Image (tube, rainbow, N blue to C red):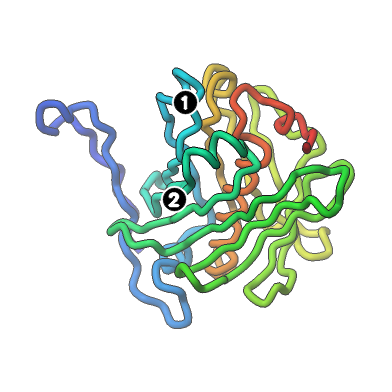
Amino acid sequence: MNTPQRPQGAYGAPPGQRYARPITWMPAPPPLPNCPPGLEYLSQVDQMIIHQQIELLEIIIGFETSNKYEVKNAWGQMVYSAFEDTDCCTRNCCGTLRPFTIKITDNVGQEVIELQRPLRCSSCLYPCCLQELEVHAPPGTPVGYIKQTWHPFLPKFTIQNELHQDVLKITGPCIVCSLCQDINFEVLSLDEQTAVGRISKHWSGFLKEAFTDTDNFGVQFPLDLDVRMKAVLLGACFLVDFMFFESAGGGRQRMGVWG
């Protein structure tokens, strides 16, 4: 297996693009048997990094725009692009609780994963108000679900396959807030005794944390985990982001107070 080359700088770029950030895409792997198209990339990685792009309009006037993300491998190569598909009214009226569809595309713009979140309340006081996310790969074909599990103190989730069978658990910290360090959600076996991965919200610096809702995440999982479950864990990053970190400046949800 060839070692990926470090991306080249943009100093040879045409005028006006000299300081543009170079983008290097992960080489497309060959098709795999019994693998949804576009998920072949996931067979070669055991971690991904999700960068939310900064939206100047949100910073200047606080107007909520559609979120956009870059999904990269450990080498910094682009694996997918992702964007939120919601209308203006939904984003600004429903806030972090809004229902959404997130479309995840590959290097040629083909949609390979679709995330669907229904409108639900978010409160630890009412077991009936639990969040969930449905993962399709390709769009129209469910491959798994993330379902919030009621707990009075901890953010907990169950990862299910396309048959709604439990596969993994996710448990977050009691206080979903931290200064100058990452916040980790552990991916666990069904008996919650063995750690098999982790979803981490990376500390982005004081100014970005205080004045924007732009977040960076990392997700780790076993290399031999089924690519469908890897796609579902990727979807879990987006659900965790909206539930706990989407509000600029911290807000009540960052402090672990749901609802």
- Residue depicted at x 79% and y 65%: 190
Q: Residue at x 78, y 37 (%)?
A: 259
Pointer 2 or 1: first along the chain: 1
The residue located at (74%, 69%) in the rendering is 166
Specify the quadrant of the image occupied by residue 247.
top right
**Of helix, strand and loop, which one carries label 2?**
loop
Element class at badge 1: helix
User: Relative to 76, does residue 248 appear above or below in the rendering?
Assistant: above
Q: Where does the image place residue 33, in percent across and percent down from the top left?
A: 43, 82
Q: Is residue 213 above or below residue 235?
A: above
Relative placement, left or right, of 178 versus 6 is right
Mark 2 is surrounded, within 10 Å at the Cα level, by few (under 14), some (14 to 19) or many (20 or more) other residues, namely many
Bin the neighbour count of mark 1 within 10 Å (Cα to Cα): few under 14, some 14-19, many 20 and up. Answer: some
Q: Amino acid at mark 2?
A: Asn
Does residue 30 lie above or below 66 as drawn? Answer: below
Query: Residue 131's x, y, as percent?
Result: 71, 52
Is 10 displayed left or right of 47 in the figure? left
**Residue placed most toward the observer, 210 or 20:** 210
Horizontal side of 57 relative to 225 (left or right) equals left
Q: Which residue is identified by label 1?
A: 58
Q: Tell me the tag on residue 244.
A: none
The reply to whether dot 2 and dot 1 touch (C-beta < 8 Å) is: no
Q: Is residue 222 visible?
A: no
Q: Which mark is residue 73?
A: 2
- Nearer the observer: mark 2 or 1; the answer is 1
Q: Position of residue 104 (x, y in %)?
A: 43, 56
> Please, what is the three-letter code of the amino acid marked with disc 1?
Glu
User: In front here: 197 or 164?
Assistant: 164
**Depth check: 78 or 64 in front?**
64
Which residue: 59% across, 25% down?
Answer: 248
Residue 6 showing in the rendered view: yes
